[in-house]
Image: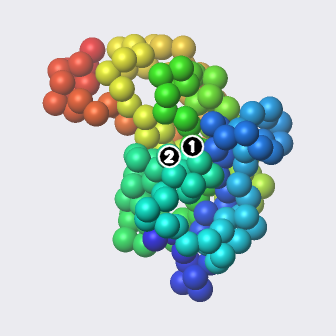
Amino acid sequence: DFNDSTGKSRILSIWNMGRRGTPPAGFDYGTEITYDSIEYYRLNLRPDPININQWERLFGYSFHGTPVAGLAAGKNGVAPGALIAGVALTAFADTLLRSDRMLDAMVYLYQTAQKIKRKCIINISLGTPWGGPHDGKTLVEKAIDNFAFEKPDLLIVSSAGNEGNNFKHWGGF
């Protein structure tokens, strides 16, 4: 779903924050899976449906972000020709809502786009009923605004949560 018309991957890199290895430049945790490695795995390793755990340990757990990326940039998505960089934010209670990890992810993705002289759209596909009122006043929301403020080549979108029918999300509070 993320290959171009010639069969090559449109995924530039993946930063798996929860896996030990070689982190991206400027960071001291996780492991970056580069384009060359992605192409190697794509050509030489086929996912074993019985042992999907090996793929998840390598690329991150694909229970939410991957389908959302498919809607945005898959071959039948909104932007089927887009180049993709991803960050696998480990979804465990101690890391899921860590604002420092989210901010690091934004920096990494923006730097990745800058390297190839492209505009950057970051989808933060992480919404929970916790972590504040979702009114733009929490520290992480302010940090996202500050990061994007002077970057005309950057757009950040974020989910409001998975409780869209909850008054907290649509009621403006």
| Residue at 43% in and 62% down | 50
Residue 130: x and y in percent read 36, 17
Q: Amino acid at mark 2?
A: Tyr
Vertical placement of residue 123 versus 118, above or below: above
The quadrant holding residue 110 is top right
Task: Give residue 61's mark.
Answer: 2
The quadrant holding residue 5 is bottom right
Label 2 vs 1, first from the N-terminus: 2
Task: Give residue 88's mark.
Answer: 1
* Residue at disc 1, secondary structure: strand
Q: What separation in Å lies between label 2 and label 1 (alpha carbons)?
A: 7 Å
Q: Amino acid at mark 1?
A: Ala
Q: Residue furthest bottom?
A: 6
| Residue at 79% in and 34% down | 27
Residue 25: x and y in percent read 83, 42
Residue 108 in sight in this render: no
